[in-house]
Image (cartoon, rainbow, N blue to C red):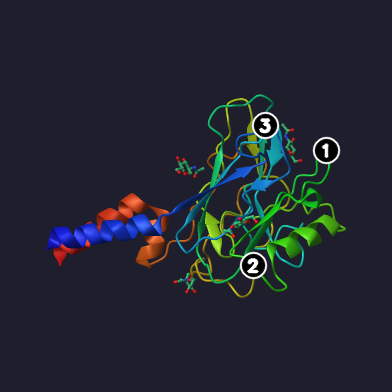
Amino acid sequence: MQLLTCFAVLSAVAVASAQVFVDVGRSPGSGGSVFRFVPNNITASNGTVITFRFTGSPGNHTVTQSTFDDPCNPMAGGFDSGNVYIPPGFTATPPLFNLTVTDDTQPIWFFCKDLRPIPHCQQEMVGAINAPTSGEYTLQAFAQSAMRASNPAGQGQGGLVGQGASAAALPAPISNGVSLAIGAPLSTSAGSSPSGTGASPSASTGASHTSGATSSTGSAPTPTTNAAAVMRGSPLVALAAVAFGIMLA
Ligand SMILES: *[C@@H]1O[C@H](CO)[C@@H](O)[C@H](O)[C@H]1NC(C)=O
Ligand SMILES: *[C@@H]1O[C@H](CO)[C@@H](O)[C@H](O)[C@H]1NC(C)=O
Ligand SMILES: *[C@@H]1O[C@H](CO)[C@@H](O)[C@H](O)[C@H]1NC(C)=O
Ligand SMILES: *[C@@H]1O[C@H](CO)[C@@H](O)[C@H](O)[C@H]1NC(C)=O
C-alpha cells in the first residue's frame, strides 16, 4: 500500500518535472549562429523546466523577460540570464539556463537584449511561453512589434525570479567564455507580485548579481510552503520529504 502510494508520488513528480529544450542562437542540426530561439513558441505547464541551451557559436546572447507592449526592454521584476558568450568553434556542452514555469495562466514574453553586431531583438530574437495562438497577443504579433521597436534593447539586468517563471542559477561560465550579468539591476518590486514569487516582502529576488563572473552569485528563488513549488526547487529533497511524510502517515 505504502509502496503503491510511493509509486503514485513518483509518477506525479515525473509529470511535474517535464523539460523542454530551447536552443539559443542556433538551429538544431546546423552549425554557426542565428538570431533565434529555437523553438520560440513554447507551451509549458507549471513546474515544466525550460532549459535554454546556449548553442550558437559564436554567440553572445541573453534570455530576458519583457512585456508584450515593450518587447525589447527588460521587464522590471523579470528573469534575465545575463549575457552568455560562446566563442567560435565551441562544441562542448553548452551553458544552460533552467527556467521553471510558475504560472501557466498567462503568456511569458522574452527576448535577447544583446546589441552586437546589431540589436538581436529587432532581428526577431524573441520568444514566448504560453502565448495565445490567435487574437491580438500572439507570438507573431510580439515578433512583429519587436522588429519595429524603436529602442534597440534596454540593457537593465533582470533577476533570477521572473513573473510566471524563475531560475535558480545563472548559466555557468564555460572554460574559455564568460557569463555576464551586466547593466543596472532592475526593480523587482512590481506591485502586483504574481504567485510563485512568495509572500515574504523581504524575499530575495535574485537581483543581486552584477557584473563579473556570475557562476555563484544567483540567489535561490523564494522558499514556499507549497509542495509542488518545493519539488520544482529541489526534486530530490522534495521527494525525500514526501516519502518521509508517507512513512509517518
Ligand atoms: C510552434 O510553431 C510551429 C510552426 O508554426 C508549430 O508547428 C508548432 O506546433 C508550434 N508549437 C507550439 C507549442 O505552439
Ligand atoms: C557579450 O556581450 C556583452 C554585452 O554586449 C559584452 O559586455 C561582453 O563584452 C560580450 N562578451 C564578449 C566576449 O564579447
Ligand atoms: C499554475 O500556477 C498558477 C500560479 O500559482 C495558478 O494560478 C494556476 O492555476 C496554475 N495552473 C494550473 C493548471 O494548475
Ligand atoms: C540545468 O539543468 C541541468 C539538468 O537538466 C543541470 O545539469 C544543470 O546543472 C542546470 N544548470 C543550471 C545553471 O541550473
Q: Which mark is residue 133?
A: 2
Q: Along the horizontal axis of the image, is 78 left or right of 224? A: right
Count of numbered labels shown in the rendering: 3
Confirm or reject: label 2 Cβ below 8 Å from ligand 1. Answer: yes
Q: Quadrant of residue 135?
A: bottom right
N-terminal of the pair, mark 1 or mark 2, is 1
Q: Secondary structure at mark 2?
A: loop
In which quadrant of the rendered image does the C terminus lie? Answer: bottom left
Could you tell me how far apart the alpha carbons at marks 3 and 1 are, in whole angstroms? 14 Å
Residue at which label 1 appears: 117
Residue 195 on image: x %, y %? 51, 71
Q: Nearer the viewer, mark 3 or mark 2?
A: 2
Residue at which label 3 appears: 57
Q: Residue at x 48, y 61 (%)?
A: 222
Give the residue type at disc 1: Pro
Give the residue type at disc 2: Thr
Q: Along the horizontal axis of the image, is 86 left or right of 122? A: left
Q: Marks 3 and 2: CB-CB under 8 Å?
A: no
